[in-house]
Image (cartoon, rainbow, N blue to C red):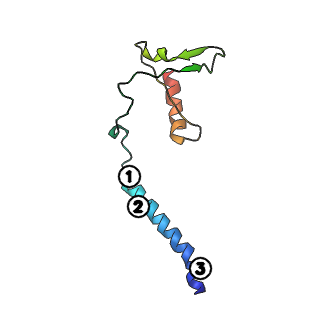
Amino acid sequence: MKRNVLLLPLLIFLLIAAALLWQLARNAQGDDPTALESALTGKPVPAFRLESLETPGQYYEADVLTQGKPVLLNVWATWCPTCRAEHQYLNRLA
């Protein structure tokens, strides 16, 4: 009986590892971000006001996105490795 109790955590670990590996293998090709259409496509830009990070006291309104020029608004997080990897490429575009 004691031996079965000792093997139970190992069995649980192996089952969890197998489930994770199965999910990784199933999604080996990666997610297709174009498969889901955005619910915001074709809708007007919501009103907002953002303070500039470079110039204190300068603000950007929503109309900067509707002036007919292309605008890249990147939303990212410091804990996101993909976001940090793309940062160097976005700096080149700036």
Residue sitting at x 47%, y 14%: 63
Q: Nearer the viewer, mark 1 or mark 3?
A: 3
Q: Is residue 37 above or below residue 31?
A: above
Q: Position of residue 37 (x, y in %)?
A: 34, 35
Which amino acid, mark 3? Leu
Residue type for callout 1: Ala
Q: Residue at x 54, y 41 (%)?
A: 81
Q: Tell me if mark 2 has few (under 14), some (14-19) or many (20+) residues whose alpha carbon lies within 10 angstroms of its own.
A: few
Mark 1 and mark 3 lie on one chain; the one further toward the N terminus is 3
Residue under pointer 3: 6
Quadrant of the rendered image containing residue 40:
top left
Q: Nearer the viewer, residue 87 or 27?
A: 27
In the structure shown, which secondary structural element does the residue marked by tag 1 occupy?
loop
For the point 56% across and 73% down, the residue is: 9
Query: Mark 3 and mark 2: span between their CA atoms?
Result: 25 Å
Question: Residue 34's spot in the image, x, y percent?
Answer: 34, 37
Mark 1 burial class by Cα count in 10 Å: few <14, some 14-19, many 20+: few
Q: Disc 1 versus disc 2: distance between alpha carbons?
A: 10 Å
Q: What kind of residue is marked 2? A: Trp
Question: Residue under circle 1?
Answer: 28
Secondary structure beneath dot 3 equals helix
- Provide the residue designation for mark 2: 22
* The disc label shown at residue 73, or none: none
| Label 2 secondary element | helix
Whole-percent x, y for residue 86 in the image: 50, 34
Q: Residue at x 38, y 52 (%)?
A: 28
Tag 2 or tag 3, which sits nearer the N-term?
3
Percent coordinates x, y for residue 74 in the rendering? 50, 28
Total residue callouts: 3
User: 5 or 72, which lies in front?
Assistant: 5
